[in-house]
Amino acid sequence: MKMYFNEEHKLFREGFRSFLQKEAVPHIEKWEETGTIDRFIWEKFGEMGYFGINYPEEYGGMNLDLFYTVVFLEELQRIHSGGFAAAMWAHAYLAMTHLNAEGSEAIKQKYLRQSIEGKMIGCLCISEPFAGSDVAGMKTTAIKKGDKYILNGSKIFITNGVYSDYLIVAAKTDPDQRHKGMSIFLVDRDMPGVSANKLDKLGWRASDTGDIAFDDVEVPEENLMGAEGKGFGYIMQHFALERLIMGINAHARAEYALEYTMKYMSERKAFGKHLNEFQVLRHKVAQMASQVEVNKVFNYNITYRLDNGDYVVKEASMSKLLSTKMADEVIYECLQLLGGYGYMEEYPLARLLRDSRLGPIGGGTSEILCEIIAKMVLDNKVYEKAAH
């Protein structure tokens, strides 16, 4: 992997892995049980610069290449909590991406800077009860009234949706339009009319996933991010990064599951032989290792292109489609190879299986991704970057 990772990336990986083992891992089980991640860990991430990897130096970031983000994502998948990982990357690469791309200078100085420092937590609010994958079909409205927008509606399945300090909210400023009537707003958690309810989930137990209601919330016009009516383009532009992130997460958790399983097989005996000596099991591992490697190298190639300015929405959609499916299949087989122990909560495979299942659903379902990819490869549909 020398064509993608240099010695600095390697040192960053070692340092981040050590940091997670010391600062996060001792608390993971508590966070999984309570569904609440203590605030101190956000500030620890901020102190170490981990939220500022790809952000401008003038706001406290480090302006590093995207392969540092790959390291960040991969290592988060190795500490046995998809929910904790999701809370961290949803803050750093969903909410903060919009702050950096569409936020005014005043918004960046306050919210982006404090987000990089880990003193503020953000969430991105797009999905609605009846408009998940159909983003343009959302019903939440923000109607201009004087120097404010009056925000009404609801969002659902929002990671960091309960305990975050601010919300990046997509809403219709022109309800009669679909794509062209959408705008993006920054909403403070303590604004009157904002309420949230925590959802009970199959996996990602450590993260707070919420449904959020907006009841006549008065949003100052300076909290409009970017241009009015351009919100759909902004969202689509950032989907490429979000889908690639989910693809990288998928190959990383599958790789971790496989490493754990191979170690188990080298130690466990049956009928007088170690499990890794049985041909049928060896061939299963060979198939899984091949799947992981193919997806991983594909994802690294997309990362390289995105980091060099290519708009890789097609490839990123393919990454999420294939990598999340692969991860589910590999983790399922790995659990099987552990037998009854795989079904026990004290082993990592049970939680990995639950956490992985969100991959083909969140950030665009596999069915929707297939249609998006089909439009590009069959209908010659071209998606272009949004103009700011």
Image (spheres, rainbow, N blue to C red):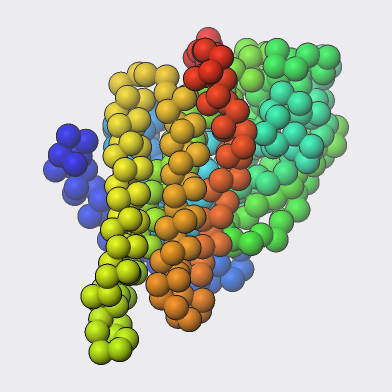
Query: Which residue is at the far top?
Result: 387
Q: Where in the figure is residue 94, as x and y percent of width and height? A: 53, 36
* Quadrant housing the N terminus: top left
Which of these two is toward me, 150 or 358? Answer: 358
Instruction: Describe residue 3's horizontal placement relative to residue 160 as left or right.
Output: left
With respect to residue 248, does 316 lie above or below? above
Q: Is residue 168 visible to us here?
A: yes
For the point 47% across and 24% down, the residue is: 313
Which of these two is toward me, 154 or 168? Answer: 154
For the point 49% across and 20% down, the residue is: 377
Q: Where in the figure is residue 213, as x and y percent of width and height? A: 79, 42
Q: Where in the figure is residue 170, as x and y percent of width and height? A: 68, 28
Which of these two is toward me, 363 or 125? Answer: 363
Q: Where in the figure is residue 205, as x and y percent of width and height? A: 59, 62
For the point 32% across and 69% down, the residue is: 280
With respect to residue 36, does 71 lie above or below? above
With respect to residue 302, does 277 lie above or below? below
Instruction: Describe residue 301's horizontal placement relative to residue 359 as left or right.
Output: left
